[in-house]
Image (cartoon, rainbow, N blue to C red):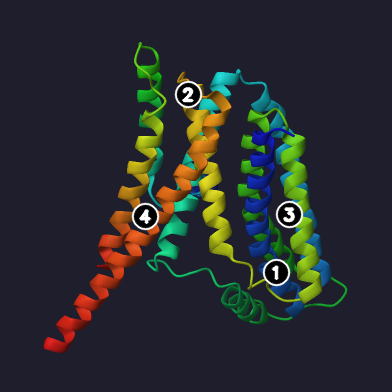
Amino acid sequence: MTGTEWGLALSVFLACAVEAVEALTIVLAVGTTRSWRSSLTGVGAALLALAALTAALGPALTALPINVLRVVVGALLLIFGLQWLRKAILRASGLKALHDENEAYEHELAAARGAGTVERDRLDPYSFTIAFKGVLLEGLEVVFIVLTFGANQHNVGLAAAAAGVAVLAVVLAGLAVHAPLARVPENTLKFAVGVMLTSFGIFWGAEGAGAHWPGDDAALLVIIPAVLLFSIGLAATLRRRSAVASRAAAGQAVRV
Amino acid sequence: MRRIESFLRFLWEFVVGDDWRIAAGVVVALAVTALVAGTSVSAWWILPVAVGLLLAVSVWRVARTHW
Protein backbone atom coordinates (compact mmCIF):
# COMPACT_ATOMS: atom_id res chain seq x y z
CA MET A 1 0.00 0.00 0.00
CA THR A 2 1.18 3.53 -0.76
CA GLY A 3 1.40 6.27 1.87
CA THR A 4 -1.77 7.91 0.54
CA GLU A 5 -3.61 4.59 0.77
CA TRP A 6 -2.46 4.18 4.38
CA GLY A 7 -3.76 7.70 5.06
CA LEU A 8 -7.05 6.80 3.39
CA ALA A 9 -7.47 3.60 5.40
CA LEU A 10 -6.53 5.27 8.70
CA SER A 11 -8.87 8.24 8.16
CA VAL A 12 -11.81 6.01 7.25
CA PHE A 13 -11.05 3.63 10.15
CA LEU A 14 -10.95 6.44 12.74
CA ALA A 15 -14.03 8.24 11.38
CA CYS A 16 -15.98 5.01 11.24
CA ALA A 17 -14.90 3.96 14.74
CA VAL A 18 -16.11 7.26 16.24
CA GLU A 19 -19.48 7.08 14.47
CA ALA A 20 -19.85 3.39 15.36
CA VAL A 21 -19.28 4.15 19.07
CA GLU A 22 -22.14 6.68 18.95
CA ALA A 23 -24.44 4.30 17.05
CA LEU A 24 -23.60 1.47 19.49
CA THR A 25 -24.76 3.61 22.43
CA ILE A 26 -28.17 4.10 20.80
CA VAL A 27 -28.59 0.44 19.81
CA LEU A 28 -27.49 -0.80 23.25
CA ALA A 29 -30.01 1.50 24.95
CA VAL A 30 -33.05 0.39 22.91
CA GLY A 31 -31.92 -3.23 22.75
CA THR A 32 -31.43 -3.51 26.52
CA THR A 33 -34.66 -1.78 27.53
CA ARG A 34 -37.04 -2.89 24.79
CA SER A 35 -36.29 -5.51 22.13
CA TRP A 36 -32.98 -6.85 20.85
CA ARG A 37 -34.66 -8.52 17.88
CA SER A 38 -36.33 -5.29 16.70
CA SER A 39 -33.20 -3.20 17.36
CA LEU A 40 -30.96 -5.58 15.41
CA THR A 41 -33.51 -5.69 12.58
CA GLY A 42 -33.28 -1.88 12.49
CA VAL A 43 -29.47 -2.08 12.44
CA GLY A 44 -29.58 -4.60 9.57
CA ALA A 45 -31.99 -2.46 7.54
CA ALA A 46 -29.81 0.64 8.04
CA LEU A 47 -26.64 -1.25 7.04
CA LEU A 48 -28.38 -2.49 3.89
CA ALA A 49 -29.46 1.08 3.03
CA LEU A 50 -25.90 2.36 3.58
CA ALA A 51 -24.41 -0.45 1.46
CA ALA A 52 -26.92 0.30 -1.34
CA LEU A 53 -26.02 4.00 -1.20
CA THR A 54 -22.29 3.20 -1.41
CA ALA A 55 -22.85 0.79 -4.31
CA ALA A 56 -25.00 3.32 -6.19
CA LEU A 57 -22.90 6.46 -5.67
CA GLY A 58 -19.43 4.86 -5.84
CA PRO A 59 -19.41 4.11 -9.59
CA ALA A 60 -21.08 7.47 -10.34
CA LEU A 61 -18.30 9.33 -8.52
CA THR A 62 -15.46 7.33 -10.05
CA ALA A 63 -16.87 8.05 -13.53
CA LEU A 64 -16.14 11.78 -13.09
CA PRO A 65 -13.03 13.23 -14.80
CA ILE A 66 -10.12 13.18 -12.30
CA ASN A 67 -9.77 16.97 -11.91
CA VAL A 68 -13.53 17.50 -11.46
CA LEU A 69 -13.55 14.62 -8.97
CA ARG A 70 -10.64 16.12 -7.02
CA VAL A 71 -12.27 19.57 -6.78
CA VAL A 72 -15.60 18.07 -5.68
CA VAL A 73 -13.98 15.64 -3.25
CA GLY A 74 -11.54 18.30 -2.01
CA ALA A 75 -14.37 20.80 -1.38
CA LEU A 76 -16.54 18.24 0.42
CA LEU A 77 -13.65 16.89 2.51
CA LEU A 78 -12.68 20.43 3.47
CA ILE A 79 -16.23 21.39 4.46
CA PHE A 80 -16.67 18.19 6.47
CA GLY A 81 -13.13 18.17 7.89
CA LEU A 82 -13.31 21.79 9.02
CA GLN A 83 -16.63 21.13 10.78
CA TRP A 84 -15.13 18.11 12.62
CA LEU A 85 -12.01 20.10 13.48
CA ARG A 86 -13.97 23.17 14.58
CA LYS A 87 -16.06 21.13 17.04
CA ALA A 88 -13.01 19.20 18.28
CA ILE A 89 -11.06 22.45 18.88
CA LEU A 90 -14.01 24.02 20.73
CA ARG A 91 -14.33 20.87 22.89
CA ALA A 92 -10.58 20.67 23.54
CA SER A 93 -10.54 24.32 24.62
CA GLY A 94 -13.49 23.86 26.98
CA LEU A 95 -15.84 26.08 24.95
CA LYS A 96 -18.14 23.19 24.06
CA ALA A 97 -19.18 20.29 26.28
CA LEU A 98 -17.45 16.97 25.57
CA HIS A 99 -19.66 14.24 24.14
CA ASP A 100 -20.44 11.91 27.05
CA GLU A 101 -21.46 8.38 25.98
CA ASN A 102 -22.76 7.52 29.46
CA GLU A 103 -24.98 10.60 29.46
CA ALA A 104 -26.20 9.85 25.92
CA TYR A 105 -26.91 6.26 26.99
CA GLU A 106 -28.92 7.35 30.04
CA HIS A 107 -30.87 9.80 27.88
CA GLU A 108 -31.72 7.07 25.33
CA LEU A 109 -32.64 4.65 28.16
CA ALA A 110 -35.08 7.14 29.69
CA ALA A 111 -36.67 7.85 26.29
CA ALA A 112 -36.97 4.11 25.51
CA ARG A 113 -38.59 3.35 28.88
CA GLY A 114 -41.11 6.15 28.40
CA ALA A 115 -42.14 4.96 24.93
CA GLY A 116 -44.92 2.57 26.02
CA THR A 117 -44.99 -1.19 26.37
CA VAL A 118 -43.33 -3.74 24.11
CA GLU A 119 -45.57 -6.44 22.64
CA ARG A 120 -43.88 -9.85 22.71
CA ASP A 121 -43.45 -11.76 19.43
CA ARG A 122 -44.04 -8.61 17.38
CA LEU A 123 -41.62 -6.15 15.86
CA ASP A 124 -41.30 -3.19 18.22
CA PRO A 125 -41.61 -0.11 15.95
CA TYR A 126 -39.85 2.15 18.50
CA SER A 127 -36.74 -0.05 18.81
CA PHE A 128 -36.62 -0.61 15.04
CA THR A 129 -36.96 3.09 14.19
CA ILE A 130 -34.48 4.39 16.79
CA ALA A 131 -31.85 1.76 15.88
CA PHE A 132 -32.43 2.30 12.14
CA LYS A 133 -32.20 6.10 12.41
CA GLY A 134 -29.20 6.00 14.74
CA VAL A 135 -27.15 3.70 12.50
CA LEU A 136 -28.27 5.41 9.27
CA LEU A 137 -27.48 8.94 10.44
CA GLU A 138 -24.12 8.04 12.01
CA GLY A 139 -23.34 5.85 9.00
CA LEU A 140 -24.11 8.51 6.37
CA GLU A 141 -21.03 10.47 7.31
CA VAL A 142 -18.93 7.31 7.07
CA VAL A 143 -20.41 6.47 3.65
CA PHE A 144 -19.53 9.97 2.53
CA ILE A 145 -15.94 9.63 3.74
CA VAL A 146 -15.60 6.13 2.22
CA LEU A 147 -16.92 7.40 -1.12
CA THR A 148 -14.87 10.58 -1.33
CA PHE A 149 -11.58 9.01 -0.23
CA GLY A 150 -12.19 5.76 -2.09
CA ALA A 151 -13.35 7.35 -5.35
CA ASN A 152 -10.43 9.76 -5.45
CA GLN A 153 -7.92 6.94 -4.96
CA HIS A 154 -9.98 4.62 -7.19
CA ASN A 155 -10.06 2.25 -4.25
CA VAL A 156 -13.57 2.27 -2.75
CA GLY A 157 -12.95 -1.36 -1.72
CA LEU A 158 -10.04 -0.43 0.59
CA ALA A 159 -12.05 2.41 2.15
CA ALA A 160 -15.07 0.13 2.65
CA ALA A 161 -12.81 -2.56 4.18
CA ALA A 162 -11.32 -0.03 6.64
CA ALA A 163 -14.85 1.02 7.62
CA GLY A 164 -15.89 -2.63 8.05
CA VAL A 165 -12.90 -3.39 10.30
CA ALA A 166 -13.73 -0.33 12.45
CA VAL A 167 -17.37 -1.39 12.85
CA LEU A 168 -16.29 -4.93 13.72
CA ALA A 169 -13.80 -3.67 16.32
CA VAL A 170 -16.42 -1.44 17.97
CA VAL A 171 -19.09 -4.18 17.94
CA LEU A 172 -16.65 -6.68 19.49
CA ALA A 173 -15.65 -4.14 22.14
CA GLY A 174 -19.35 -3.42 22.79
CA LEU A 175 -20.09 -7.15 23.16
CA ALA A 176 -17.14 -7.54 25.53
CA VAL A 177 -18.05 -4.71 27.91
CA HIS A 178 -21.82 -4.76 27.24
CA ALA A 179 -21.99 -1.03 27.97
CA PRO A 180 -21.44 2.24 26.10
CA LEU A 181 -17.78 2.66 25.14
CA ALA A 182 -17.40 5.73 27.34
CA ARG A 183 -13.64 5.32 27.69
CA VAL A 184 -12.96 5.79 23.99
CA PRO A 185 -11.25 9.19 23.65
CA GLU A 186 -13.88 10.42 21.20
CA ASN A 187 -12.72 14.02 20.97
CA THR A 188 -9.12 13.00 20.30
CA LEU A 189 -10.32 10.67 17.53
CA LYS A 190 -12.55 13.40 16.10
CA PHE A 191 -9.60 15.80 16.23
CA ALA A 192 -7.48 13.29 14.29
CA VAL A 193 -10.22 12.65 11.72
CA GLY A 194 -10.75 16.41 11.28
CA VAL A 195 -7.01 16.89 10.67
CA MET A 196 -6.90 14.06 8.10
CA LEU A 197 -10.04 15.14 6.21
CA THR A 198 -8.90 18.77 6.13
CA SER A 199 -5.37 17.87 5.01
CA PHE A 200 -6.52 15.59 2.17
CA GLY A 201 -9.16 18.19 1.27
CA ILE A 202 -6.47 20.89 0.95
CA PHE A 203 -4.25 18.59 -1.13
CA TRP A 204 -6.86 17.24 -3.55
CA GLY A 205 -8.87 20.47 -3.73
CA ALA A 206 -5.83 22.53 -4.77
CA GLU A 207 -4.70 19.84 -7.26
CA GLY A 208 -8.17 19.62 -8.79
CA ALA A 209 -8.29 23.42 -9.12
CA GLY A 210 -5.08 23.26 -11.17
CA ALA A 211 -2.40 24.05 -8.57
CA HIS A 212 0.82 22.01 -8.42
CA TRP A 213 2.20 21.03 -5.01
CA PRO A 214 5.95 21.36 -4.46
CA GLY A 215 7.14 17.77 -4.01
CA ASP A 216 3.88 16.32 -5.40
CA ASP A 217 2.45 13.62 -3.07
CA ALA A 218 5.23 14.27 -0.51
CA ALA A 219 3.53 17.64 0.19
CA LEU A 220 1.03 15.67 2.30
CA LEU A 221 3.87 14.92 4.74
CA VAL A 222 4.04 18.66 5.41
CA ILE A 223 0.32 19.49 5.14
CA ILE A 224 -0.87 16.92 7.74
CA PRO A 225 1.56 17.99 10.53
CA ALA A 226 0.97 21.66 9.68
CA VAL A 227 -2.82 21.30 10.01
CA LEU A 228 -2.33 19.31 13.24
CA LEU A 229 0.03 21.87 14.80
CA PHE A 230 -2.14 24.82 13.74
CA SER A 231 -5.24 23.17 15.26
CA ILE A 232 -3.45 22.29 18.52
CA GLY A 233 -2.17 25.88 18.66
CA LEU A 234 -5.69 27.26 18.16
CA ALA A 235 -7.10 25.02 20.91
CA ALA A 236 -4.28 26.01 23.31
CA THR A 237 -4.73 29.73 22.58
CA LEU A 238 -8.49 29.55 23.12
CA ARG A 239 -8.03 27.57 26.36
CA ARG A 240 -5.56 30.16 27.67
CA ARG A 241 -7.80 33.10 26.69
CA SER A 242 -10.81 31.39 28.30
CA ALA A 243 -8.86 30.90 31.56
CA VAL A 244 -7.83 34.58 31.56
CA ALA A 245 -11.43 35.67 30.86
CA SER A 246 -12.73 33.43 33.69
CA ARG A 247 -10.16 34.84 36.15
CA ALA A 248 -11.05 38.41 35.14
CA ALA A 249 -14.78 37.67 35.59
CA ALA A 250 -14.13 36.08 39.00
CA GLY A 251 -12.02 39.09 40.07
CA GLN A 252 -14.76 41.48 39.01
CA ALA A 253 -17.36 39.47 40.97
CA VAL A 254 -15.20 39.65 44.12
CA ARG A 255 -14.79 43.44 43.75
CA VAL A 256 -18.58 43.89 43.37
CA MET B 1 -43.98 19.37 0.42
CA ARG B 2 -43.09 19.18 4.09
CA ARG B 3 -41.03 16.04 3.43
CA ILE B 4 -39.04 17.76 0.69
CA GLU B 5 -38.53 20.73 2.98
CA SER B 6 -37.29 18.58 5.85
CA PHE B 7 -35.05 16.58 3.49
CA LEU B 8 -33.50 19.80 2.18
CA ARG B 9 -33.02 21.04 5.74
CA PHE B 10 -31.36 17.74 6.66
CA LEU B 11 -29.12 17.95 3.59
CA TRP B 12 -28.13 21.53 4.46
CA GLU B 13 -27.32 20.59 8.06
CA PHE B 14 -25.48 17.44 6.93
CA VAL B 15 -23.26 19.15 4.36
CA VAL B 16 -22.95 22.74 5.56
CA GLY B 17 -23.15 22.15 9.32
CA ASP B 18 -23.04 24.78 12.05
CA ASP B 19 -21.17 27.51 10.20
CA TRP B 20 -22.17 28.24 6.59
CA ARG B 21 -19.25 30.66 6.29
CA ILE B 22 -16.84 27.70 6.23
CA ALA B 23 -18.62 26.12 3.24
CA ALA B 24 -18.84 29.46 1.42
CA GLY B 25 -15.19 30.25 2.20
CA VAL B 26 -14.01 26.87 0.88
CA VAL B 27 -15.89 27.39 -2.41
CA VAL B 28 -14.44 30.92 -2.81
CA ALA B 29 -10.91 29.71 -1.96
CA LEU B 30 -11.14 26.91 -4.55
CA ALA B 31 -12.39 29.37 -7.18
CA VAL B 32 -9.50 31.78 -6.42
CA THR B 33 -7.03 28.85 -6.59
CA ALA B 34 -8.41 27.87 -10.02
CA LEU B 35 -8.17 31.48 -11.25
CA VAL B 36 -4.59 31.96 -10.03
CA ALA B 37 -3.54 28.49 -11.30
CA GLY B 38 -4.52 29.67 -14.77
CA THR B 39 -1.84 32.39 -14.59
CA SER B 40 1.93 32.05 -14.22
CA VAL B 41 1.70 32.62 -10.44
CA SER B 42 2.01 29.61 -8.13
CA ALA B 43 -1.39 28.78 -6.54
CA TRP B 44 -0.79 25.90 -4.07
CA TRP B 45 -0.48 28.20 -1.02
CA ILE B 46 -3.94 29.81 -1.38
CA LEU B 47 -6.00 26.92 0.01
CA PRO B 48 -3.86 26.28 3.15
CA VAL B 49 -3.91 30.01 4.01
CA ALA B 50 -7.68 30.24 3.40
CA VAL B 51 -8.34 27.12 5.49
CA GLY B 52 -6.26 28.49 8.38
CA LEU B 53 -8.14 31.78 8.30
CA LEU B 54 -11.58 30.15 8.01
CA LEU B 55 -10.91 27.81 10.94
CA ALA B 56 -9.45 30.53 13.16
CA VAL B 57 -12.28 33.00 12.44
CA SER B 58 -14.96 30.32 12.93
CA VAL B 59 -13.73 29.18 16.37
CA TRP B 60 -12.93 32.76 17.41
CA ARG B 61 -16.54 33.83 16.70
CA VAL B 62 -17.80 31.10 19.06
CA ALA B 63 -15.16 31.88 21.69
CA ARG B 64 -16.07 35.59 21.76
CA THR B 65 -19.62 34.75 22.86
CA HIS B 66 -18.13 32.97 25.94
CA TRP B 67 -15.76 35.74 27.02
In three-dimensional space, the C-alpha distance between marks 4 and 1, rounded to whole angstroms, equals 42 Å
Query: Are the residues tagged 3 and 2 within 8 Å (C-beta)?
Result: no
- Residue at 52%, 49% (x, y): give it: A194
In three-dimensional space, the C-alpha distance between marks 2 and 1, rounded to whole angstroms, equals 55 Å
* Residue type, numbered disc 2: Pro
Which of the numbered marks, if any, corresponds to residue A126? 1
Where residue A253 appears, as percent x and y from the top left, is 17, 85
Instruction: Tell me, yes or no, whether dots 2 and 1 are on the same chain.
Output: yes
Q: Judging from the image, what secondary structure is the residue with disc 3 in?
A: helix
The residue indicated by pointer 3 is A166
Circle 4 chain:
A
Which of the numbered marks, if any, corresponds to residue A234? 4
Q: Earlier in the sequence, mark 2 or mark 1?
A: 1
In three-dimensional space, the C-alpha distance between marks 4 and 2, rounded to whole angstroms, equals 26 Å
- Residue at 67%, 25% (x, y): give it: A62
User: Within 10 Å of the Cα at label 2, are there few (<14), some (14-19), or many (20+) other Cα atoms?
Assistant: few
Which of the numbered marks, if any, corresponds to residue A214? 2
Which of the numbered marks, if any, corresponds to residue A252? none
Quadrant of the image occupied by residue A134 = bottom right
- In the picture, measured across the screen, residue A115 lies left or right of residue A256, that is right
User: Within 10 Å of the Cα at label 3, are there few (<14), some (14-19), or many (20+) other Cα atoms?
Assistant: many
In three-dimensional space, the C-alpha distance between marks 3 and 2, rounded to whole angstroms, equals 34 Å
Query: Are the residues tagged 4 and 2 within 8 Å (C-beta)?
Result: no
